[in-house]
Structure formats: C-alpha cells, structure tokens
Amino acid sequence: MPNLRISEAAALLGVSDDTVRRWIDNKRLPATEQGGRMAVDGRALAAFAQELADSPEAGTTTAASARNRMRGIVTRVVKDGVMAQVEMQTGPFRVVSLMSREAADELGLEPGVVAVASIKSTHVVVEIPEG
C-alpha cells in the first residue's frame, strides 16, 4: 500500500498540511517516518477520511463552481461476480462509482489508492493519476 506525503494527505482530505501534522501529533492519524519525512499509510488515511465524512460540518454556500474531475482516495470497494462499487473521499465529498469488476481489478482499486473521479451527468469514471 502506498505511503503518502503530508501534503498529499492534506490535499486529499481538503485541509492544510498543518492540520494533518496536528492530527498526527495528537495521535488521531498514524504516520511513520520515511527518509526523514513523515508519511501516512494509504489505508489509514482512507479510514480516517471515512471517519471525517461521517460527521460533516454544516455550512452555507454563497457561490460554487463545480468541477468534473476530483482527485481523492478510495475508501471502500465492494465486488461481486460482475460489478464493483467503489467509494472515494474527495476532500469533503463522498463519491460512489458503479463499474465492472474487471475495470476495478484492472485499475487495482482498493482502500488507500489515490484516484480521480470524472463526473458527467450520472456517470462517474475513475482514473489513476500519473505518479
């Protein structure tokens, strides 16, 4: 499973690098040292993202500009014989995609994998970004 830099974890959760560091310091988010830098395990980040999403903050929207591509982290994958349900956390948003099991297997989708959700109407396409 990939280890993510603090800045990557922050971007995926939609918070600042300092917020992620505080969560690590307060033992809310586990991290390890890698080459002199702190790193967060992808699975741990996926679980933490789900925990954060369970209690969304209420807010007021004054303006919005929706984008159709959202980088996030896979938090859950449920597969049966033919289909797969892939859940992602993209900042404060939970995105769910239904796709063939073959596509999910080919993309290597599992909790902790960084992916991009492309959204058009009711269809969600999941892509793996370049390293």
Image (tube, rainbow, N blue to C red):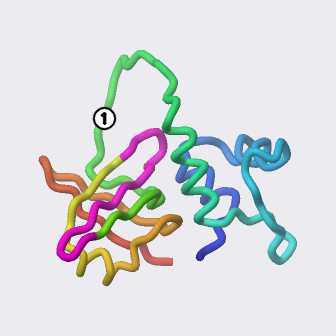
Side of 47 where 26 appears, left or right: right
Side of 92 where 97 appears, left or right: left
Dominant secondary structure of the residues highlighted in magenta in the image: strand
- Depth check: give the residue in front, 121 or 130: 121
Does the segment drawn in magenta span residue 51? no
For residue 61, above or below residue 39: above
- The quadrant in which residue 44 appears is bottom right
The residue furthest left is: 121
- Depth check: give the residue in front, 26 or 7: 26
Q: Residue at x 59, y 65 (%)?
A: 42
For label 1, the SS is loop
Q: Residue at x 38, y 64 (%)?
A: 77
Q: Position of residue 127 (x, y in %)?
A: 32, 70
Q: Position of residue 96 (x, y in %)?
A: 30, 52
Q: Which class describes the residues within 10 Å of circle 1: few (<14), some (14-19), or many (20+)?
A: few
Q: Callout 1, which amino acid?
A: Ser
Side of 98 where 7 appears, left or right: right
- The quadrant in which residue 64 appears is top left
Q: Residue at x 79, y 42 (%)?
A: 22
- The quadrant in which residue 83 appears is bottom left
Tell me the magenta residue range.
80-94
Q: Position of residue 62 (x, y in %)?
A: 36, 17
Q: Position of residue 129 (x, y in %)?
A: 41, 72
For mark 1, what is the residue? 65
Side of 113 where 21 appears, left or right: right
Count of numbered circles on the image: 1
